[in-house]
Image (spheres, grey):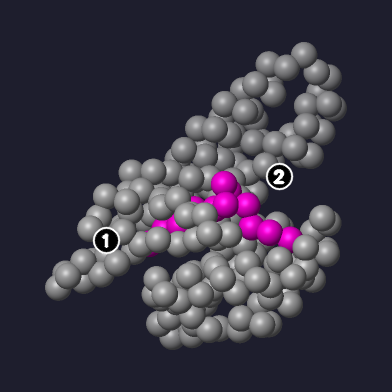
Amino acid sequence: MSSLLFNLVIDELFEIIGDRFGYELQGMGSVNARAFADDITLMSGSEVGMQQLLLETEKFLTARGLELNVEKCTAICLRKAGKVKNSQVADSSVTNPPRFTVQNKPIPLFGINEKCRYLGVHFTPFGAVDPRVSVSVLRTALSCLSKAPLKPQQKVLMLRSYLIPRFIFTFTHTEYYPKLMGEQDRLIRR
């Protein structure tokens, strides 16, 4: 499905669910869904609300001939850790683990020591992975490109058309420090 058609369908879903079941962000209001290209992220302030969001999304998509792919779904559940103000990752190892389902199939819980890749950025349950990882991947990719048996114009084309776009989302959606940004810039300009 083209991204334009997908976005038209998803816009309708977002209108229907509104801000119900959302996660409350201090000073910002309630947030319950985000979308980029053909990826959807649903979030809720409660486990019951999350399952309700999943049910409504599943019902909406099914009525339009679409479905969620359970194999590509993952759930991250944070629970209050008693009297401490920290949260704990509620994975399958905790007592009474959460259970989220789509099409009556359980969505795998994201464990505390796991990493996943979402839109080119590696995440743990606590946020984006160390941005220096992206710099080392960029360095390796640039090294391979410089050693490739291509004409200079072809290398510039590969760099501009494929390599830099591959890292744009990562560079703009993780926390980078000025020193790392300078390092990336120097690597690309070489």
Task: Tell me which numbered mark, 1 or 2, is placed earlier along the sequence.
Answer: 1
For mark 2, what is the residue?
Answer: 165
- On the rendered image, what quadrant is the N terminus found in? bottom right
Membership of 67 in magenta stretch: yes
Residue at 57% x, 26% y: name it.
Answer: 140
Q: Which stretch is magenta?
A: 66-77
The answer to whether residue 170 is seen in the rendering is no
Q: Using the rendered view, name the quadrant where residue 26 is placed.
A: bottom left
- The residue that disc 1 covers is 96
Label 2: which secondary element: helix
**Mark 2, other Cα within 10 Å: few <14 / some 14–19 / many ≥20:** few
**Which residue type carries mark 1?**
Asn
Tell which residue pokes out farthest to the front in this image: 104
Disc 2 marks which amino acid? Pro
Nearest to the eye among marks 1 and 2: give it: 1
Considering the whole magenta stretch, tell me its main secondary structure: loop
Which residue is found at the position 62% from the left and 28% from the top?
Answer: 141
Front residue of 155/174: it is 174
* Residue 138 visible to the viewer: yes
Residue 161 horizontal/vertical position (percent):
79, 39
Residue 189 image label: none
At which x and y percent is residue 18?
61, 84
The picture places residue 37, in percent across and down from the top left corner, at 71, 58
* Residue 149 x %, y %: 77, 14
Give me the C-alpha separation between circle 1 and circle 2: 43 Å
